[in-house]
Image: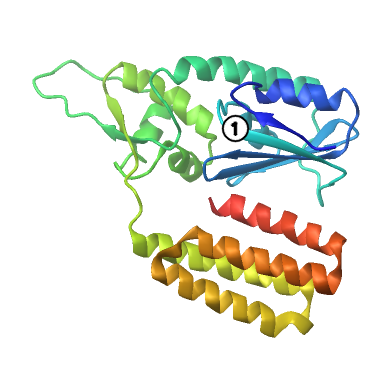
Amino acid sequence: MAFQGSLKELPLPDIIQLVSVSGKTGKFTLSREADRGFIYLKNGQMVHAMVSDLIGEEAIYALAIWNQGEFQFAPGEEPDRQTITKSNTNLLMEAARRLDEWRVLSKKIPSVDYVPELMIRENRHEQITLNPQEWMLITRIDGHRSIAEIGRALNMSSFDVAKILYGMITGELVQLKKKFERDSDQENGELVDLAARIRAVAEEFIGDSAHKTIEKHFLHALDSIMNGDGERAVDAMVQEFEKTASLLRGLAVTEQLRSRITEIRALAS
């Protein structure tokens, strides 16, 4: 039976404990606006996780600080690889510690999607001393990259970047602003790329016999994207692919296709 609810009401460490105690195998899907994350359990033990471009332990810690969104547990689904070897106890203790820290950090850093920029310090002549980590961070602050993007550039977690930034914001060296919305051309280009990757997966799972059908729905999605339908066009294409998979390959393959497409969309968000 599926298990689902709100991350606002039940933090991730508590959710994992509830499911792991029963020794279940399955997949958690966590969603927060356009973001998607996944945690796989095998016999109650976390064995694989991914969110954005993070995998394994760091993905668990990143998901643990989500304070809003939805979760759903699908029993029986297993990963195709293992990226976590630590025990649930060690992982959840570290996740809980980071969650406590994040409650403090979030007073000045609402989200890792915010963009840091250097503050202009007019008529202030005191000497500024920075440690090596702060210097390294400043070299990546350009007024365009978000905290998450800076983390990826430095091969650091968003959490660690936020911890460094917290002191710099408190010291009025850095301020945060919301990230500019993407223009329509950029967004359409990203959706076209996403649709192409989903098409490739559909062809892999359904097979060459459905090539013409897949191509037809793909081209229709491209046309709809360019006409302003946005992500709805991709949703409609995915629904058609799932119908085709169900008809030609059966329920098991359709579920595998659906799971793979969900992961692709999560990585693209």
Residue 148 visible: yes
Q: How is the image coloured?
A: rainbow
Q: Residue at x 41, y 60 (%)?
A: 187
Q: Is residue 231 left or right of residue 40?
A: left
Q: How many marks?
A: 1
Q: Is residue 184 left or right of residue 230?
A: left
Q: Give me the residue at 47% from left, 23% from top.
A: 163
**Nearer-the-camera pick, 232 or 47:** 232
Q: Residues within 10 Å of mark 1 (few under 14, many from 20)?
A: many
Secondary structure type for disc 1 = helix
Q: Quadrant of residue 112?
A: top left
Asked if residue 92 is positioned above or below residue 56 in the image, the reply reads above
Residue 65 lies, in percent from the top left, at: 58, 26
- Residue 114 at x, y = what percent? 38, 35
Q: Position of residue 246 (x, y in %)?
A: 80, 67
> Which residue is outermost to the left?
123
Tell me the residue at 80%/22% (across/down): 18
Q: Which residue is mark 1?
A: 62
Residue 98 position (above or below residue 161):
above
The quarter of the picture where residue 3 lies is top right
Residue at left offset 8%, top offset 20%: 123
Q: Amino acid at mark 1?
A: Ala
Q: Is residue 205 above or below residue 96?
A: below
Tell which of 104 and 185 is nearer to you.
Answer: 185
